[in-house]
Image: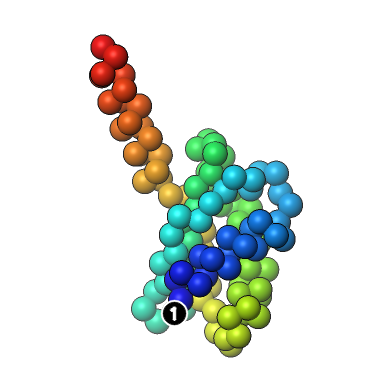
Amino acid sequence: MESDIQHLLTTLLQRDINDPCLLGTVITSVDVSRDNQSAVIKVHGMKREEADLVTERLMRLASHFEYELRRAMQRKRIPHLKFSWDSNLDQGNDMVELLNKLHRA
């Protein structure tokens, strides 16, 4: 189910959403709870400083995404979607930057 949700949400972001703030936003992972009641969608974008804005806008679109997922997956119940910034990528980038600085020194 997680890979289906990730694929469909990626398609919906590209096809349905015309928000400049969300350009370049990618879905890095989908974690569905054991009872299939909720799903945490981890996202990342081009600008770390816009993380709160990106997740806020995606949360506003959650009901649209849930409706489209229900239609596409032909299920009565779709997990409630919660969007969260994937800070792991930021931490990895910070580590690479630090290593590069040490290498140059």
Q: Is residue 37 above or below residue 14?
A: below
Three-letter code, disc 1: Asn
Q: Is residue 93 above or below residue 51?
A: above
Which corner quadrant holds the C terminus? top left
User: How many numbered discs sit on the rendered protein?
Assistant: 1
Q: Is residue 4 above or below residue 42?
A: below
Q: Secondary structure at mark 1?
A: loop
> Percent x, y for residue 98?
30, 25
Q: Image quarter for residue 70?
A: bottom right
**Residue 76 vs residue 89: left or right?**
right
Pointer 1: residues within 10 angstroms few (<14), some, or many (20+)?
Answer: few
**Residue 11 vs residue 31: left or right?**
right
Q: Nearer the viewer, residue 43 or 50?
A: 43
> Percent x, y for residue 21?
66, 44
Q: Measuring 45% from the left and 71% from the top, which residue is drawn there?
A: 2
Q: Measuring 59% from the left and 45% from the top, which residue is drawn there?
A: 24
> Percent x, y for residue 100?
31, 23
Q: Which residue is mark 1?
A: 36
Q: Measuring 40% from the left and 82% from the top, which residue is drawn there?
A: 35
Q: Measuring 63% from the left and 53% from the top, which residue is drawn there?
A: 57
> Percent x, y for residue 25?
57, 48
Residue at the extreme bottom: 76
Q: Nearer the viewer, residue 60 or 12?
A: 12
Q: Is residue 84 visible?
A: no
Q: Is residue 91 visible?
A: yes
Residue at the extreme top: 105
